Amino acid sequence: MSDRRQDKKTTHFGFKEVPVEDKASRVAEVFHSVAGKYDLMNDLMSGGVHRLWKRFTIEVSGVRRGHKVLDIAGGTGDLSYKFSRLVGPDGLVVLADINDSMLKVGRDRLTDRGISGNLVVSQADAQQLPFPDNTFDCITIAFGLRNVTDKDMALRSMLRVLKPGGRLLVLEFSKPRSELLNKAYDTYSFRLLPLMGKLVANDSDSYSYLAESIRMHPDQATLKQMMEDAGFSNCDYHDLTGGIVALHKGTKP
Amino acid sequence: MIDPTLISAATATLEAAIDKALRYDPATRQRLQQLAGKSLAIELTELQLTLGVYFEEQGIALSTHIEEPSTRLKGSLPALLLIARDPGTSLAQAGVEAEGDTSVLLAVRDIGSDLELDWEEALNDWLGDVAGHQLAQVLRGQVNWLRERANSGRRLVGEFLTEELRAVPSPSELQHFSEQVDQLRLASDRLQARFDRLRDLLSNSGSA
């Protein structure tokens, strides 16, 4: 299932339809704009809960000493920081992001926190990962998949660079289980979120896009099916905070 | 089923508290380093929850997921707390099952009994400065409020029962009452003695 429409050659950019070739540059503009205040905004928007979602992802990853981990759309390096400590001096963490502004913020932050030696930074497109086949024990993509133009292509690319038995973890906004929570969440994301974006980062458009892109992202069951279609086995997901966020897990056979 | 976010919040808080405690305790840190690479799974049967403890060079990592642990402990929460609190209790006595490397358990029990945890600082760590400070303030306020209520509450309840409700006597009334009971007992003892004496007199005069 792809959000690309072959007849018109357009795709979603939030609630708007844009030419397929324009989506990447438009997403890039959003993240260039928010990079500097990305962490502060995440803290404010989620009340600090995004840290717990990421923590749960790390717990499920099973990453241990000596593993090779790819953190796609790693942004400001929250997951990479933890992974770097877990894999130790014998392991490797690759912090990858398509957006160089986000990557610079992430690289500087990790250097400031004393991470070096087992971490490399790579500007890479999730749809065409520039790594050899069967390289990584674990791949994570946290709050990144919904911004990718062709998600099926990205999932196939991740499968290729994973080692057999390696796992993919997709942490992404999803569909709340209860209708009541869904309504409260809608009010929050379409009214409060852009307002906060305007007050803190002086950029309400970017935060409106973030809210819209969350609604356009496939729900839990659809994403699970997409992972199975891409060739992953043992696919499953955990709903977090009532399904506002879901963590999908799949293994390379 | 508990939302994984809440369980992660609990493990994050506990991990941060242990981390802080270890920072100022180099001796325990050194003892922990000898366990580096080992792991312990704690299965809480009634909660259907498994807590993983990974021993690392730099400290301890807690997790809601654990694969191939060196040691596995299984039991109810009260049973596990009992063996944690009282080192004299055996696993069998408490109803806790253990599998794998039991030397890890002995080391953990020794280390655990020496650690002092600071919960408030731990909250700051995972919630960030803004939310962590706010929550810590609220918690501190609640704890102080409860402590004050516990002290003044005892006095207030006493006053309400004695003065307003008149349900129980005041201490002075109670003392007065017990003095009167004492006097009544003495008087009845004296009456009994007089009665006995009179009875003796009558029986003596009758027989004479």
Image: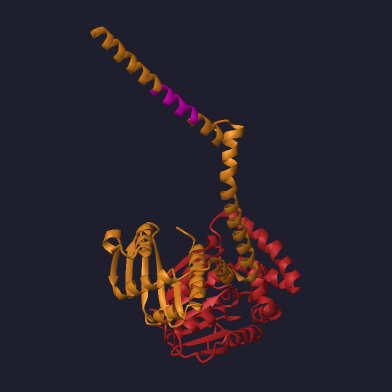
The vertical placement of B168 against A250, above or below, is above
Furthest residue in direction front, as rendered? B208
The vertical placement of B117 against B173, above or below, is below
Q: What stretch is highlighted in magenta?
A: B179-189
Q: In which quarter of the image is the N terminus of chain B?
A: bottom left
Please say whether residue B82 is one of the residues in the magenta stretch.
no
Name the image quarter holding residue A163: bottom left
Q: Is residue A13 visible?
A: no
**Toward the viewer: B131 or A87?**
B131
Tell which chain the image draws in orange.
B
Q: Residue drawn 59% across and 31% down?
A: B165
Tell which chain the image draws in red.
A
Residue B44: give x, y in percent of width and height: 37, 61
Left-right relation of A173 to B108: right
Residue B157: give x, y in percent of width and height: 57, 40
**Toward the viewer: A207 or B188?**
B188
**Toward the viewer: A3 or A48?**
A48
Furthest residue in direction left, as rendered? B207
